[in-house]
Image (cartoon, coloured by chain):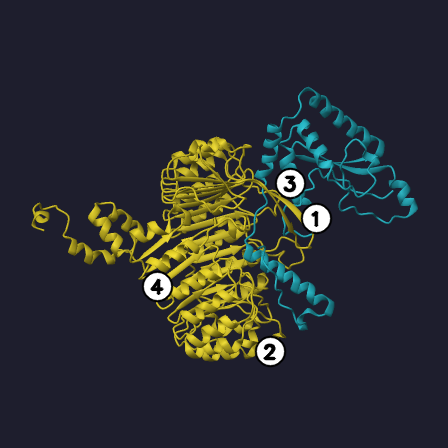
Amino acid sequence: MEERNVRANVSMPDVVLECLMPYIHDPRDRASISLVCRRWYEIDAMTRKRVTIAMCYSTTPQRLSRRFRNLESLKLKGKPRAAMFNLIPHDWGGYATPWVNEIAESFDCLKAVHFRRMIVNDSDIERLAQSRGHQLESLRLDKCCGFSSDGLLHIGRSCRRLKTFFIEESVLLYENDGEWLHELATNNTALETLNFYQTDIATVRFEDLELIARNCRSLVSLKISDSEFLGLVNFFRTASMLEEFGGGSFNEEPERYTVVSFPPKLCRLALPYVGKNEISIVYPVASSLKKLDLLYSLLDSEDHCLLIQKCPNLEVLECRNVIGDGGLEVLARCCRRLRRLRIERGADDQGMGEEEGLVSQRGLMALAQGCLELEYMAVYVSDITNLSLEYIGTYLKNLCDFRLVLLDKEAIIRDLPLDNGVRALLRGCQKLIRFALYLRSGGLSDIGLKYVGQYSENVRWMLLGCAGQTDEGLLEFSRGCPSLQKLEMRACNFSERALVTSVMRLRSLRYLWVQGYEASPTGNDLLAMARPFWNIELIPPRQIVGANSDRQVIVSEQPAHILAYRSLAGPRTDFPATVRPLHPQ
Amino acid sequence: MSKAMVELDFFRTEKDLSSSKSFDRRRSFRDLQSVISKMKPELLKSVIESGSSSSTPKQDPTPFAPLPIYSPTNSKSVSSSSSDAAARSQTAPLTIFYNGTVSIFDVPKEKAENILKLAVENSREDSSKAPVSSCERRRFINHIARDLPMARSLSLQRFLEKRKERLIGAMPYGSPKHTRFRTGRIRGYY
């Protein structure tokens, strides 16, 4: 012990470090600490509480448990992000089973599990519930598939301390009955968050929801599927602590909804299928609303304006582009505290009442000047100018996450390419960590793509669509982006050789996804990026048989995908027929 | 003879799964423009030939025999009186996409045939020199990759379909306001 204290600048005693370590939470700080020396690595390993594995095939369950025995919280992501847009084969992978098995065997302190875009079976849920149910406080099956309502029965039966149960946007194999909810309602008194929003769960007994409200006095958030809203009146009366509600649907005559009265603390709301005749139920709580989700509402542009005017405390808004430039101008005037804004793409076809809803540079410029606190902005626009992007760079200094998609509604966008606007935005928004730009042919020239590389020092994730013109653009881009860890590209049409060269230059890159590139028949050019700890997978071109909205059978061509990622686990062994691993042999 | 708008729909692409039947002509123009502007004539011909096997021409193709595919889309068959018909019998619009431009001409039938023959002959001349290699063909097909249709998120897709069902369900009963909607239970794309 004395030897270590001999020199003045020697590392501090272990005891001190062990006391300090639990206060260091940021994973990047932890990663740096673990590299100092073996002893510091060991202390970090013993005291690390939460780990997020952004790509489940980048390591193995055994490696994880060997290093971080005392984990309390684990988050895993499986399928590529493109799976949320129906671009990835359903059986691509991301199986939870090996992880659940390891959790059951080794992770004695685990309290929180979050699987995102993974395949989770009923047997996985059963194993998890039976082995760790007594200690589990949070379970999130986030955009997962592969389980049924039978699997969910185990949650109610075995996870009595569960505070958070979340299965939003998961796709169930089948739904036998609503027993799982009844089990949960009967056995659990700890629930704070219950979420089965955007699932197809149809059998929901309102009595069970009321039972949960009575038993779980800490219930703060409930988000359900499409049950009739009128059935919730009693629930709202009972759940007096409720702050967040989402779900339900409006199928009765509008006058009947006057009986709906929200709990006093409600400040986050998501109302699918709400129309102009029912939206008035929100008015009594509008001034307290901090978060509003109108993504699945049936409101038109004017309705949006009328509602938003009443919500001066709004911090988070999600809606479709039916909000229109007019709605954004109202937002800029009335909602100065706005931090997060997501504007999604509405219907393309006519007759859905969304012809008015167009977002363009006009709305963006108003927004930039009015909502200075914005940290997250994702917008589908129908028109765009360089100037509006400059405005964003000038005013929105807190922006960490910016995503812009240019719709193909307008045949001609006058102010392309957006090179200068993009440069101004990147230079102005110094805190930017995530950046997505999905344009069209001619939207960003090779010079513009070079700017993106030059001015995105802190960006860690990027999605580029139709960016650049030739391989030159990509090669110049890859000279920059020093922090880029995850890169997704679609419809950019670069050659395999350019892709490979860029990958080798982007020194922080640990994940690459590309669709729409100059694919060679064998993909062998891609092997030039083969190296240790780097998995390369190909999803060759496929023909997808599907149906359009008029129930006509359509065969569509899905071009090839490249997926490449850093891994300590070696090439994976559970890939389906649609995935072809590439390694030099 | 009805005034039919004839469009040479080379690719018969209906890529966007969520688009409705109503033909968005502007979008189709742009799609076709951008792809055609990158084409070589011999490549174009080979694609037409390969596509012709799957084409189901809706009408008798004989007026424009040299090109194997055409599908009169959005044809507004104007019910005209015989005098009008006589006046208009001579010319019909011919739409040509070439090198990134679109031109529409009102030409009599014979002239249209001649124009098309000329175009095909010219392309035939070039193609006789060098057969289209499969590598070139693949590069051409990959240029289509550049115009990948924008994908929509699954949650929104589901919502838009459900909404359509609700509206369609409401119509037969008259006033949509007082109709009981059925909450559509659409299985997602899985």
Q: Earlier in the sequence, mark 4 or mark 2?
A: 4
**In front of the other: label 4 or label 1?**
4
* Residue named by callout 2: A256
Numbered disc 3: secondary structure: helix
- At label 2, which amino acid type do we have? Arg
Q: Position of residue A237 (x, y in %)?
A: 47, 80
Q: Quadrant of the C terminus of chain A?
A: top left
**Chain drawn yellow, letter?**
A
* Residue at x-position 64% and y-position 40%: B31
Q: Earlier in the sequence, mark 3 or mark 1?
A: 1
- Label 3, label 1: how far apart the Cα atoms are: 13 Å
Q: State whether discs 3 and 4 lie on one chain.
A: no
With B35 as the anchor, is A133 left or right in this view? left
- Label 1, label 2: how far apart the Cα atoms are: 40 Å
* Residue named by callout 4: A111
Quadrant in the rendering for residue A279: bottom right
In the depicted structure, whether residue B58 falls above or below residue A324: above
**In front of the other: label 4 or label 2?**
4
Crowding at mark 4 (Cα within 10 Å: few <14, some 14-19, many 20+): many
In the depicted structure, whether residue B100 falls above or below residue A75: above
Q: Position of residue A447 (x, y in %)?
A: 46, 34
- Label 3, label 4: how far apart the Cα atoms are: 54 Å
* Residue at x-position 55% and y-position 55%: B154
Q: Chain of mark 3?
A: B
Residue located farthest toward the top when viewing the structure as drawn: B129
Q: Tag on residue B69?
A: none
**In front of the other: label 3 or label 4?**
4
Q: State whether discs 3 and 1 lie on one chain.
A: yes
* Residue named by callout 3: B30
- At label 1, which amino acid type do we have? Phe
* Residue named by callout 1: B23
Numbered disc 2: secondary structure: helix
